[in-house]
Image (cartoon, grey):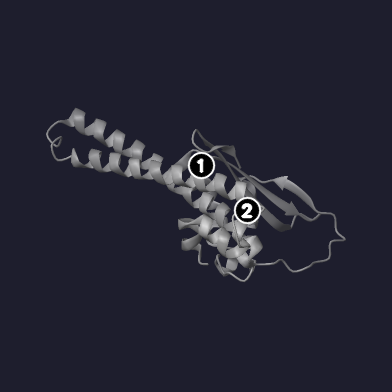
């Protein structure tokens, strides 16, 4: 099954892959994520309606600076909330699809960059994992850009975009050789949400 079909009807996807709901060992986890996903979609729908309602008031408030400023502030707030909800939806969809991907590796649910398998390397050198700072930006980007599995969203600049746009805390880790060369990166985003909980 394709990704859209799985997201639209997880139970049908379970029956298609495992044969029935009762034989799926991950059913509880899939159901839990599906419920959260439905809640996120409902919240997104409500947020879009609120945004539309605010937008429709701008024309009437064009001659009232105080009301206009209030509407602008409300629009900024709901836009940020909507962006956060959309990000939550994307994360939940990826989590949901991962359960089916592990079971059926023949389905190409993800872009090729997510299918990358790292080549085996000599691990005789001692590798350390440390949290990086802005000083490591150039080395981090050089590693991502040179890596076969690297993608745009792993570049260091996204750390500031996420922190400033969504208010999330980011923790960027790198695996380094004794001479300081980066041989692996791990960007972690800490998410705090009343709806979805606290996780990274």
Q: Residue furthest top?
A: 66
Q: Residue furthest bottom?
A: 106
**Residue 142 in which image quadrant:** bottom right
Please indicate whether residue 175 sits to the left or right of residue 133 in the image. right
The residue beneath circle 2 is 22
Residue 23 at x, y percent in the picture: 65, 56
**Residue 17 in which image quadrant:** bottom right
Q: Is residue 175 above or below residue 113?
A: above
Please indicate whether residue 65 sits to the left or right of residue 42 in the image. left
Can the viewer see residue 141? no
Q: Is residue 117 above or below residue 97?
A: below
Q: Residue at x 63, y 53 (%)?
A: 22
Residue 87 at x, y percent in the picture: 47, 48
| Circle 2: element type | loop
> Mark 1: few, some, or many residues within 10 Å (few <14, many ≥20)?
some
Judging depth in this view, the residue of 60 and 10 nearest the camera is: 10
For the C terminus, give its image quadrant.
Answer: top right
Residue 21 at x, y percent in the picture: 59, 55
Judging depth in this view, the residue of 53 and 124 nearest the camera is: 53
Distance of label 2 from label 1 (alpha carbons)? 42 Å
The residue beneath circle 1 is 163
Q: Residue at x 55, y 65 (%)?
A: 109
Please indicate whether residue 94 sits to the left or right of residue 49 in the image. right
Q: Residue at x 46, y 41 (%)?
A: 166
Q: Residue furthest right?
A: 124
Foreground mark, 2 or 1? Answer: 2
- Residue 140's disc is none
Q: Residue at x 35, y 45 (%)?
A: 45
Can the viewer see residue 97? yes
**Residue 113 in which image quadrant:** bottom right
């Amino acid at each position: 099954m394709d990704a859209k079909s799985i997201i639209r009807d997880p139970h049908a996807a379970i029956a298609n892959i495992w044969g029935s709901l009762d034989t799926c060992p991950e059913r509880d986890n899939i159901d839990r994520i599906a419920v959260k996903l439905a809640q996120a979609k409902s919240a997104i729908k409500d947020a879009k309606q609120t945004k539309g309602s605010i937008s429709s008031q701008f024309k009437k408030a064009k001659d009232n600076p105080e009301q206009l400023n209030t509407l602008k502030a409300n629009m900024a707030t709901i836009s940020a909330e909507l962006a956060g909800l959309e990000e939550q939806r994307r994360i939940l969809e990826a989590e949901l699809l991962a359960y089916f991907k592990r079971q059926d590796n023949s389905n190409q649910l993800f872009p090729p960059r997510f299918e990358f398998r790292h080549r085996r390397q000599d691990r005789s050198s001692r590798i350390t994992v440390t949290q990086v700072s802005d000083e490591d930006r150039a080395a981090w980007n050089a590693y991502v850009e040179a890596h076969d599995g690297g993608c745009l969203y792993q570049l260091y600049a996204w750390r500031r975009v996420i922190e400033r746009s969504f208010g999330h805390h980011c923790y960027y880790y790198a695996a380094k050789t004794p001479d300081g060369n980066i041989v692996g990166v791990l960007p972690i985003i800490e998410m705090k949400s009343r709806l979805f909980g606290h996780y990274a």
